[in-house]
Image (cartoon, rainbow, N blue to C red):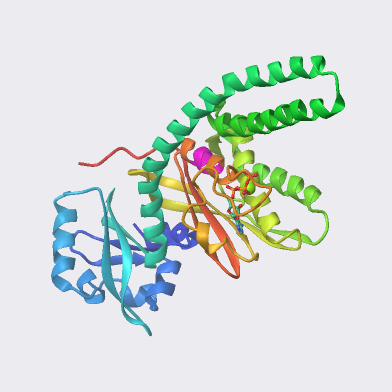
Amino acid sequence: MKNAGFDDLDLLSTAIVLMDDKGCLVHVNAAGENLLGCSVALIAGHRLNDIVGDSSEADRLIAECGARQFSVKRLQMAWQLAGRGMQVLDTTVTVVEEPRILASIELREPDAFQRIDREERQAALMQMNQLLLRNLGHEVKNPLGGIRGAAQLLDAELPTRALKEYTEVIIKESDRLQSLVDQMLAPVRRSLTKSSVNIHSVLERVRTLVLSEFPKGLKVIRDYDTSLPEMQGDSEQLIQMALNIVRNAAEAVQGVGTIWLKTRVSRQVTLHRRRYRLALSLSIRDDGPGIPEAIRDEIFYPLVSGNPKGHGLGLTIAQTIVHQHGGVIVCRSESTGTEFLILMPLGGPLPAQV
Ligand SMILES: Nc1ncnc2c1ncn2[C@@H]1O[C@H](COP(=O)(O)OP(=O)(O)OP(=O)(O)O)[C@@H](O)[C@H]1O
Ligand SMILES: [Mg+2]
C-alpha cells in the first residue's frame, strides 16, 4: 500500500498511528504529527518502542497484536511528544486485517477518553433509571386522567368563583404533570423509523428553528464536512436530539452569543464495545457561561435542571436518541463555553475479530 492510500486519515481530528507486524510505524496522520510533534517522514520506519516510554510494554503490545489476543484494547501509555516530553495518552489499539498493517493506534489526550469511557459506564446505569422512570410515568399517567376528569366535573357543579379556583389549580397542575410525563415517555413512545438521513439537513432544520426562536443576537456558525455519507437514522428523532442541545446552548447565551455546529468523519471508532469503520462526529459548542458546576456531572439524568423554567429532560431525551442510534454523547463545559460531542455510527459494525 502506498502512502497515498492513507490520505483520508489526514481528514481525522484524532491522531492515528499505523503499525506493521514487526512493530514498525508505517504511517501517522496529520493529527498524529501534530500531537507527537514530528513528521511522518521522521517517524516512519521507527519501532513503536522508540517513541513510547516503556519499551517492554511496547513489545508486549506488539506480541499481543500479532497473536490476535484482542481486537480492541484501551490503555494509558506514555508517549514521547516533541516539546512536551513524556505524556500519558489514552491509547486505543485496534488490530486490523490490512496488508502490511497489524494495528491502528488511536491517541487522545486523556480527558476525552475518560469521558467516553465514563459515559458508556453511566449509560448502563441510566438505562435502569430510565426504565424505572418510565414505569413510574405510566403509573402516574392513568390516575392523572381520572383526577383531571373528576376535577372538571366538580368544577361544573361548584356554585362560586372562589371555589372554582381550587378546581382550576387541580386541572392546571394535572396538565403540567401530564406534559412532564408525556415528555418522559416520548423517546420510547414510538419506535424508530430509520431511513437514510443527511445530518446536515437535520442541522439546518434545527438552525432555522432556533434562529426563529432567538432572532436577535444569536449567531450559528456551520463547519460541515460535506463529504460525510448519509446515516441510517430517524430524522425526526435526530432533529429532536440536536434541537434539545442547540436550544440549551441558545438559552445559556441568553439569545446573545455564538453556537458552532461542526461535523466530521471519524474512522475506526469503538462505540458500546462495537467497532465501526466510520462514524459521524458532531460537535455542538457555545460561548455561554458553562453548565452550573453543581449539576455538571448529572446533566444527562432526568429532572436535573439549572433552569427554573426547565423540565430537566432535554438532555436525557437527547442521550436516549443518540443511544438508540448506537452512539455516545459526551459533554465538556467550562466557564467560557460548553461543547457536546456526539459520535454515531455510519454503517454497521465490523465483524468481531478473534
Ligand atoms: N450549553 C449549555 N450551557 C450551559 N448550561 C447548559 C447547557 N446545556 C445544558 N445546560 C444545563 O443543563 C441543564 C439540563 O438541561 P436539559 O436540557 O436536560 O434540561 P432543561 O433545559 O433544564 O429543561 P428541558 O427539559 O425543558 O430541556 C439545563 O437546565 C442547564 O442548566
Ligand atoms: Mg433543555
Whole-percent x and y of residue 242? 62, 45
Asked if residue 128 is positioned above or below residue 15 in the image, the reply reads above
Q: Is residue 166 visible?
A: yes
Dividing the picture into quadrants, the one containing residue 142 is: top right
Asked if residue 8 is positioned above or below residue 139 in the image, the reply reads below
Q: In this orientation, which residue lies closer to the viewer: 180 or 276?
A: 180
Is residue 126 on the magenta stretch? no
Q: Residue at x 42, y 52 (%)?
A: 267
Whole-percent x and y of residue 91? 31, 62
Number of callouts in the render? 0
Q: Is residue 88 left or right of residue 180?
A: left
Whole-percent x and y of residue 283? 56, 56
Dividing the picture into quadrants, the one containing residue 177 is: top right
Q: Residue at x 46, y 35 (%)?
A: 130
Q: In this orientation, which residue lies closer to the viewer: 342 or 47?
A: 342
Q: Is residue 190 visible?
A: no
Q: In this orientation, which residue lies closer to the viewer: 41 or 325?
A: 325
- The residue range painted magenta reads 318-322
Question: Magenta stretch mostly in which secondary structure?
Answer: helix
Q: Is residue 197 left or right of residue 113?
A: right
Whole-percent x and y of residue 339? 56, 60
Q: Residue at x 37, y 59 (%)?
A: 114
Q: Quadrant of the C terminus?
A: top left
